[in-house]
Image (cartoon, rainbow, N blue to C red):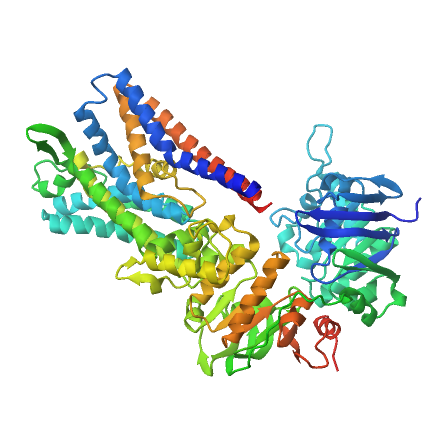
Amino acid sequence: MSEYVVELKHVTKKFPGVVAMRDMHIQIRPGEIHGLIGENGAGKSTLIKVLTGVYIPEEGEIYVDGERVSFRNPVQARQAGISCVYQELNIVKMLPVVDNVFMGRKITNKLGMLDYPSMRAQAHQALEVLGHPEIDTRMECGKLGIGLQQMVEIAKAVTMNAKLIIMDEATSSLGEQEIHQLMETVRNLKSQGIAILFVSHKLEELFELCDRVTVMRDGEYVRTDDIKDLNEDILIQAMVGRTLENQYPKVSGRRGECFLKVEKLNEIGVLRDVSFEAYGGEILAFAGLVGAGRTETMRAIFGADKLDSGDIYVKGKKVNVKNPGQAIACGLAFLTEDRKGQGLVLSLPVRTNLVMANMKKYRHGLLLNHKRIGEVSEGNVKALRIKTPSINEIVVQLSGGNQQKVVIGKWTNCDAEIYIFDEPTRGIDVGAKVEVYNVMNRLVQEGKCIIMVSSELPEVLGMADRVIVMREGHVMAQIERGGEHFNQQDIMKAAWGGKIA
Amino acid sequence: MTMIKAKKKSGLGDLMMKLGPLFVLAVLFIVFTIARPGRFMSMANQMNILKQTAVNCLIGSGMLLALITAGIDLSVGYNAILATCTIGVLMQNFGITSPWILIPAAILVSSFAGFVNGTLLTRLDLPHPFVSTLGMKNVLWGTALLITASKTIGFTNKGIDEVLWIGRQTFDIDIFGFKLLEGFPVSFILVILVYLVFHVFLNHTALGRQIYIVGGNPEAARMSGIRSKDVLTIVYIISGIMCGIAGVVLAGRLNTANTASAATYDTDAIAACIIGGASFRGGKGTIWGTMLGALLISTIRNGLNLFSAGNDIQYIVIGSVIILAVTIDVTRGKLEARARKLATI
């Protein structure tokens, strides 16, 4: 038996134009609980997908039990003994537990029929190992709680004789009780000699559960240590420890009056007493981990989701926004995180996308004034430097950066005053990022108010005048540019639930 | 480099897809003209094709809107029949003969059915208009049977010729004694007028463009302040109105109100739209393409008739054409996805 159950050496995974993971290595011992952490976009998901055969790496070697393997598809990885329990469970809720455990596999009897008694016995045995013999294998999965559904998913891995089970943010959708239950199960698995790769956003869980922890940053390996040699500060330093490159052409505006004030926004299970103020002439950034409730806050303000309670004031006047149309009428603009899903109609031309948020403005009697739409669109293309063959080109043909500029153009055409930019530079290349920043600078100088949700700390530090850090639907900290806490370390700390002095 | 190449390819494909139905129509014309000399190309036969196309064109225009929003309206056939039956019942049971009452009444009934379709879809959040309109198809059929007591109502010599005029009347155009057109159906003039209105509506009004936007991406439309639900409801009301107008034309064409005659109206309308370039994925389709699609279907039916092919063969051929058209639609989607991928590299 080799020292490591799974080992990665010098593994590199590239995508057109991006290296998602470079020269990565990780060594997982049999029967250990191995933590994996990193910032958003540090390459954790890429690593998981390489281990489970979803991605085929360009370079490097993978060893299972000391033998070199190369997975060409997920089935091969599973057969080699690597299983993954994803945050989004792969459960068919209408089917009984046993069918879920044996999804994609079967035990047949002499007649070629499914041998349910054997399958049930095996499923039951697996659930027993997990410490949940009480789950009836005939029960419909949908009737189980999320925590137990996860057990079914893990049982699937156990019956496949997994040597390594990857748990990707497995606790994020669970309640406290269920998390406790899951940790017990993980320890049971460990005692059976099964290794666990535990990916989590919660430091306290890592300290409670793991034997060793590997840190990733920017698609690269940073360090692996025994948990007893680590503390929170070391881990956070390792996650963020890069230098700020000067790719942020920050131009400060003059802080004007309060454009937007929200008080005690509450959405059950999502937002908790969120209050803040945003001013004209400044960029207010929202930092935090994915799922911290930042996008949800913005959607609620924009009338896209319903609030349970809370007040919103625009320029001192209380507003009651019930749908995005009313928000737009109040002078709000929302560049959604999901550009293609919520910002654009890909199958329609640039010109239509540019005017779709306020078509009424282009009405001339009953009909649309196509000439005016054309003029405005041409003006947008020039002002925002949108690279497109013509305003009649369908948006799907444009690059990500230019698509983003079309969305920005759509909102500037509405004469908005308050711009919410949700992950404005996600998935666009460096050059286009700078152009998006320049547009933001220009808006701020014109006295507009910008609220920027960003998961990239360098971007937050590079562009923001003020930062609000959120965690689990709650505002954790508010940090001014130039203040002593305006640094990656402290923002990260707040985002991970730590107190900053 | 790849970008330019990909674009050229998709541009050419696009043109082919647009001209495809026209090309097929031309080939059919040549084949039928040669195979049935003097019969297919005769003025009477050509006018007959137009007469047969009118109802499908009217129903198809409403269907097109539904398809653009990535929806479908399966209730159109029986909605049109219900309109015809409404005329029949008002005439027979209530003695009303004025076209100024009968025609608006028919259209009102059908547009109300459309309103119900839209409301079921948008306010009860039924998963897909397939569900609501399929249900409504049966409801409308049942209603038509109910109000007519399942009997066929004849319109001949009942004093409502003014209503029947639209679906029945033809006229000639002479230029210096030369018969340019002979027996041109009024119903097709109506189609041309309706289609002109649709063209302007879809391309030159805010609501028309919003229909495409909602169809292309309902979520983006909502986040841009467009009231997607209202737009959808209006779409199904318009589809209902078109069914009502089609029902009026049907009264004149069939001379009866007969609940059993709606068999192929829904599929014919869907086929016309898809052949004409609309997509089940929404966001696409033009009104003139739909006219071309409807003409293509009528021409095939007419040609098969001239070959003395019965209903059996006609159903098989039309069914195959529908499947072919959807296959083309799917292939078109794949081609576009490929071009998109090439363009992003």
Could you say which is closer to the camera, residue A164 or residue A47?
A47
Residue at x-position 26% and y-position 46%:
B242
Residue B76 image offset from top left, x and y in percent: 31, 43
Is residue A98 rendered to the left or right of residue B57? right
Residue at x-position 53% and y-position 71%:
A442
Instruction: Tell me if I can see residue B144 in this picture.
Output: no
Residue B177 image offset from top left, x and y in percent: 6, 28
Could you say which is closer to the camera, residue B234 or residue B266?
B234
Residue A265 image offset from top left, x and y in percent: 55, 76
Report how many numbered discs are placed on residues in the image: 0
* A171 in relation to A346, above or below: below
Is residue A183 rendered to the left or right of residue A246? right
Could you say which is closer to the camera, residue A44 or residue A205?
A44
User: What quarter of the picture does the N terminus of chain A occupy?
Assistant: top right
User: What quarter of the picture does the C terminus of chain A occupy?
Assistant: bottom right
Residue A187 image offset from top left, x and y in percent: 84, 58
Is residue A248 rendered to the left or right of residue A205? left
Instruction: Tell me if I can see residue A171 in this picture.
Output: yes
Residue at x-position 19% and y-position 34%:
B254
Could you say which is closer to the camera, residue A353 or residue A132?
A353
Residue at x-position 37% and y-position 34%:
B19
* A263 in relation to B274, above or below: below
